[in-house]
Amino acid sequence: MNSQSPQSPQPQPAAKPRRFLYFIIGLVLGALIVPAAAYVYFVGGYAPVATSAPPMPFERYLAHKALHARLAEVKLAAPPISPTAQNLLEGVRVYKQHCAICHGWPHLPRSAEAAGMFPRPPRVFHGLGVTDDTPAETHWKAAYGIRLSGMPGFARSLPDKELWEVSFLLADATNLPPPVQAALSPTNAPAFIGSAGTNQPAAD
Ligand code: HEC
C-alpha cells in the first residue's frame, strides 16, 4: 500500500501531545493575565492613592460587601445597658471627644480632617445616619473598626460601656430626648467642627 495516499494519512504521533501542551500553556497564561494586570495596575502607578482621587473600580462595592458579609458571620454582643437619657448624655460626651472630628456635629459643616478623608466618614447626624442599624451593629463597628477606611476600632482604648452609650446615641439619632438634643446643639460643638472651610463640595 502506498503510504503517501490520501486515504491513509501519515500518522502524526507528535500532534496530540503538542496540542495538549499548547492547551496547558494557554491555561497558565490565561490564569496569570488577571493577577499580572492587577500587579501592573498597582505597581505601575495606575491605582488611585490620593484620598481625593476617585474610587478604584468596584472598591466601594467590594468593601461594603466584605463588611456586610463579615457582620453576617459574627455574633453581635447583647447590649449590657439601656438607652436611658443619662446613658445617651454620656454618649454625647464620648461622641464629642472621640467621634465628632470625623463624623461631624448636627447642623454644622465637617472638620478639616474629615473633609480630607477617603472614604469620607458618614455624617451620622445627617438624614437617617446609622439609625437603620441596630445598636449592636454600630457597637461592633465602633469596637473593631473598619479596615482600610480610617474608621478606628476603639475596643482597646475605650471602656465597653462608653461604646454602648455612643452606639445607642447614634441608633436613636433621629429620636433623641430634648436634653440630649440640647447637648448636641451647635453651641456645644467642639472647636474643630466646621473647620473645613468653604472649598469642599456642598453635596456630601
Ligand atoms: C479618624 C476618623 C474617625 C473617627 C475618629 C471615628 N470614625 Fe467612624 N468611620 C470613619 C470612616 C472613614 C467611616 C466609613 C467607613 C466606610 O465607608 O467603610 C466610619 C464609619 C463608621 C460607622 C459605620 C457607618 C455606616 O454607615 O455603616 C460607624 C457606626 C462609626 N463609624 C462609628 C464611630 C464611632 C461611634 C466613633 C467614636 C467612638 C467613630 N466612628 C470615630 C472614620 C472615623
Image (tube, rainbow, N blue to C red):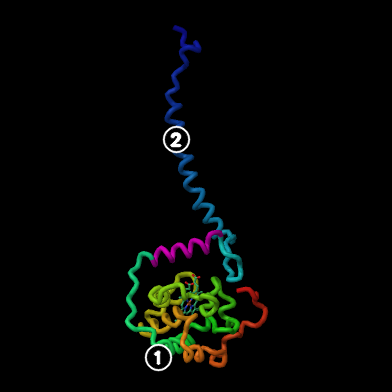
For marks 2 and 1, the one nearer the N-term is: 2
Residue drawn where x is 45% and y is 26% of the image: 15
Amino acid marked by disc 2? Leu
Residue 115 position within the rendered picture, expressed as x and y whole percent measured from the top left = 59, 77
Relative depth, front residue between 104 and 37: 104
Residue 61 within the magenta-colored segment of the rendering:
yes
Residue 1 placement: quadrant? top left
Q: Which residue is mark 2?
A: 21
Q: Which residue is mark 1?
A: 86
Q: Write the start and end of the magenta stretch as one range.
A: 57-71
The label nearer to you, 2 versus 1, is: 1
Q: Main secondary structure of the magenta part?
A: helix
Q: Is residue 78 visible?
A: yes
User: Is the CB–ligand 1 distance for label 2 below 8 Å?
Assistant: no
Relative depth, front residue between 38 and 179: 179
Residue drawn where x is 57% and y is 64% of the image: 55
